[in-house]
Image: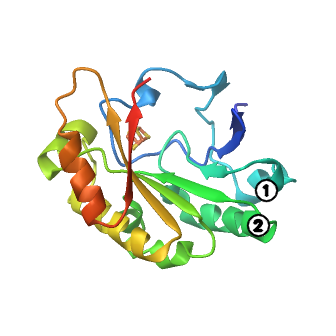
Amino acid sequence: MNDVFTYKLEDLLYINLTNSCTNSCSFCIRDKCDGLGGNNLWLERSPTASEIISRIPEPLLYPEIVFCGFGEPTMRLDVLKEVAKYLKDKGGITRLNTNGHGNIINKRDIVPELKGLIDIVSVSLNAGTKEEYDRICSPKLPNAFEAVTDFIEKSAKTLPRTVATVVRVPGEDLDIEKARRLATKLGAEFRIRDYE
Ligand code: SF4
């Protein structure tokens, strides 16, 4: 059974919460390989909170513990929150890597629920306009770009650190400066990730 619920990359620990996602990005690593760092991240089933917790007896061993998934972690919000509470109670530093659809996935504003549980939120903004976003990310939910920008703005107001990211893909026609201006307007930091 494939049960890579957690894995280490460099010195960080990553939590593979789910393989489900509400986007279908043109650069998604899931279309190109089965995982990262030699780990096959396609799961036969999603982990429970206690299964993840049992694999992280010492959270302080890592500078950050990252909720990611080979998918969108806010699709498993209850598990995310339970594990994050355990990690914070032990003094760990938590990061959420998200596509920013958490509020439309869960049909409510989830940002206040992350307060005290998540230290850093990294949101895939991916574009400076709705047209670009829809072209690059092919979202499966309506009004996804609006949801992402709203999530970033709420997160930047509520949580300690919010970073909006774009992926620089060779040959992709993307107005990165427009995305940077949007991220700044929303109150977030901005980071360009290079496509690998
Ligand atoms: S949001 Fe992330 S996991 Fe989902 S399709 Fe895009 S790159 Fe892949």
Residue type of the residue flagged with mark 2:
Tyr
Residue 65 drawn above or below residue 107: above
Residue 93 visible at all: yes
Residue 120 drawn above or below residue 89: above
Q: Is residue 127 left or right of residue 21?
A: left
- Which residue is more in the foreground, 30 or 150? 150
The mark nearer the N terminus, 1 or 2, is 1
- Image coordinates of residue 91 in percent, x first then y, are 78, 66
Residue 5 visible at all: no
Q: Residue at x 87, y 53 (%)?
A: 57
Q: How many marks?
A: 2
Mark 1 → mark 2, Cα distance in angstroms = 7 Å
Whether the residues at callouts 1 and 2 have beta carbons within 8 Å, the answer is: yes
Reading the image, the residue beneath label 1 is 53
Residue 101 drawn above or below residue 115: above
Q: Residue furthest left?
A: 131
- Image coordinates of residue 174 in percent, x first then y, are 19, 35
Question: Is disc 1 placed on a helix, strand or loop?
Answer: helix
Q: Residue at x 33, y 69 (%)?
A: 153
